Amino acid sequence: MTKSAKDIKQQLNSIVDRRNKIAHEADIDPTFNIGGRWNIDEVLVGDAVDFIERLVESIHQVL
């Protein structure tokens, strides 16, 4: 991968944090009284999937 280890870890942590918000907090932004959902769109999801695929392929090549 062309990114530094720090950048890769940061991006992976962002994906995990978002996953946890979806799974454990119903993806609700707590800053609103009733709570609105955090924004998500196809581009965000596609970027996450592409990143994970590249990461897995890179790990597979090393092993």
Image: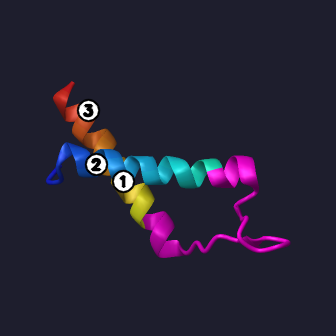
Q: Which residue is more in the foreground, 11 or 46?
A: 11
Please report the residue visible at 21 percent of the width from the left and 43 percent of the height from the top: 5
Q: Which secondary structure lies at badge 2? A: helix
Mark 1 surroundings within 10 Å by alpha-carbon count, few (fewer than 14), some (14 through 19), many (20 or more): some
Magenta segment, which residues?
21-46
Residue 11 numbered mark, or none: 1
Q: Is residue 1 left or right of residue 11?
A: left
Q: Which secondary structure lies at badge 3? A: helix
Rendered image quadrant of residue 58:
top left
Q: Quadrant of the C terminus?
A: top left
Percent of width and height locating residue 18: 56, 55
Please report the residue visible at 58 percent of the width from the left and 72 percent of the height from the top: 40
Q: Which residue is more in the foreground, 55 or 17?
A: 17
Q: Is residue 59 magenta?
A: no
Do callouts 2 and 1 mark residues in contact (Cβ within 8 Å)? yes
Percent of width and height locating residue 56: 33, 40
Mark 3 surroundings within 10 Å by alpha-carbon count, few (fewer than 14), some (14 through 19), many (20 or more): few
For label 3, the residue is 60
Mark 2 surroundings within 10 Å by alpha-carbon count, few (fewer than 14), some (14 through 19), many (20 or more): some
Please report the residue visible at 71 percent of the width from the left and 70 percent of the height from the top: 31
Q: What kind of residue is marked 2?
A: Ile
Q: What kind of residue is marked 1?
A: Gln
For label 2, the residue is 8
Disc 2 and disc 3: Cα gap in Å? Answer: 16 Å
Q: Is residue 47 left or right of residue 41?
A: left
Disc 2 and disc 1: Cα gap in Å? Answer: 5 Å
